[in-house]
Image (cartoon, rainbow, N blue to C red):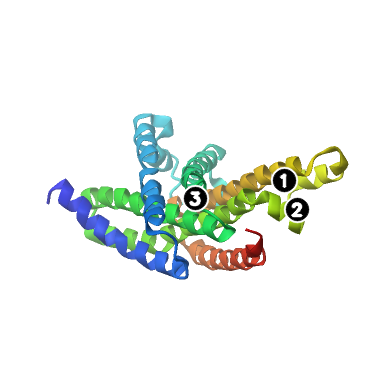
Amino acid sequence: MSNLTLSILIGLINAVPILIWGSYFLHKHNEKRKWVLFSFSLGALSVVPLVFLRYFTDLIPFLDLQNTLQANSLLQSSFFNIPISLIMFFVIIAAIEEYLKHKVADKVSRNEITSIDDAIEFSIMAALGFAFAENTFYLINIWKNLDIQTFTSVFMLRAVFSTFAHCLFSTIYGYYFGLALFSKKVYNDNQYHAWSLTRLLKKFHFRFKRGFMAKIFAAESQFVGLFYATSLHAIFNILLEFQFTLFLAPFFIIGLSCIKKLIESKKALKELA
């Protein structure tokens, strides 16, 4: 089988969970098709820098994740035995991925996002595009180097958990990104002062213009969104890499509850957007 045929075949297989999760999260949305496809495509392209980064880390011994894990017998380790350097590695990778998906949503925001609901939707579309490309690259490598049984188990794991996880992280970020985009209305009308810096500055509100406070609120909202998304992403990567599969089900359940809570929250703010 040629590389092109293999890539197309695995891409088609990967499209199935993407369509299922997309239908689950976005079935009530009717956005312009071109911007939906644009977000998905940019999300998929944003994987490319990560592919080069992974290749780069494989060339340098102390950055080669798999060799480091095997050399230190960490594949069967407990969470508390994981070196801080590896935890930081996962945090950096998660931060890069979430930032790249953020840039996709930011690119769309100037043209199409008119509500917090839209911010969540386009963030999810970027996540689905990213997950599609990432899973395709990953499974092509598995197919070439391992057996069909491993390929099947990895596909199921990534189709169910990894794709959902990307949607979860982007839902969280999309919500806070939406707060940032409509910070003036949210801040002025709802006094939604959830973050520490905004609360602190509120005590000196008479010294600042309302527009300045709204900008502070917007910047802090984006930071909080990226912080939450990156933190959960790093934890999820650690669970996968160290085969802590027993924790994936609770992660899944808690993630669904988190999405439900955020959707209910943004409904209360929908009229402001």
- Tell me if mark 2 has few (under 14), some (14-19) or many (20+) residues whose alpha carbon lies within 10 angstroms of its own: some
Between the C-alphas of marks 1 and 3, the distance is 36 Å
Out of 133 and 149, give the one closest to the viewer. Answer: 133
> Disc 1, disc 2: CB below 8 Å?
yes
Tag 1: residue type? Answer: Ala
Image coordinates of residue 99 in percent, x first then y, are 51, 42
Q: Earlier in the sequence, mark 1 or mark 2?
A: 2
- Tell me if mark 3 has few (under 14), some (14-19) or many (20+) residues whose alpha carbon lies within 10 angstroms of its own: some
Image coordinates of residue 268 in percent, x first then y, are 67, 66
Q: Is residue 142 left or right of residue 265?
A: left
Tag 2: residue type? Answer: Asn
- In this rendering, which labeled residue sits more in front, label 1 or label 3? 1
**Could you tell me which secondary element the residue under label 3 belongs to?**
helix
Question: What residue is drawn where x is 58% and y is 68%?
Answer: 260
Which residue is under mark 1? Answer: 214
Q: Earlier in the sequence, mark 1 or mark 3?
A: 1
Out of 52 and 236, give the one closest to the viewer. Answer: 52
- The mark found on residue 188 in the picture is 2
Question: What residue is drawn where x is 77% and y is 55%?
Answer: 191
Q: Is residue 233 above or below residue 64?
A: below
> Disc 1, disc 3: CB below 8 Å?
no
Between the C-alphas of marks 3 and 2, the distance is 40 Å
Question: What residue is drawn where x is 51% and y is 65%?
Answer: 252
Residue 155 shows up from this direction: yes
Tag 3: residue type? Answer: Ile
Out of 141 and 214, give the one closest to the viewer. Answer: 214
**Could you tell me which secondary element the residue under label 1 belongs to?**
helix
- The mark found on residue 238 in the picture is 3
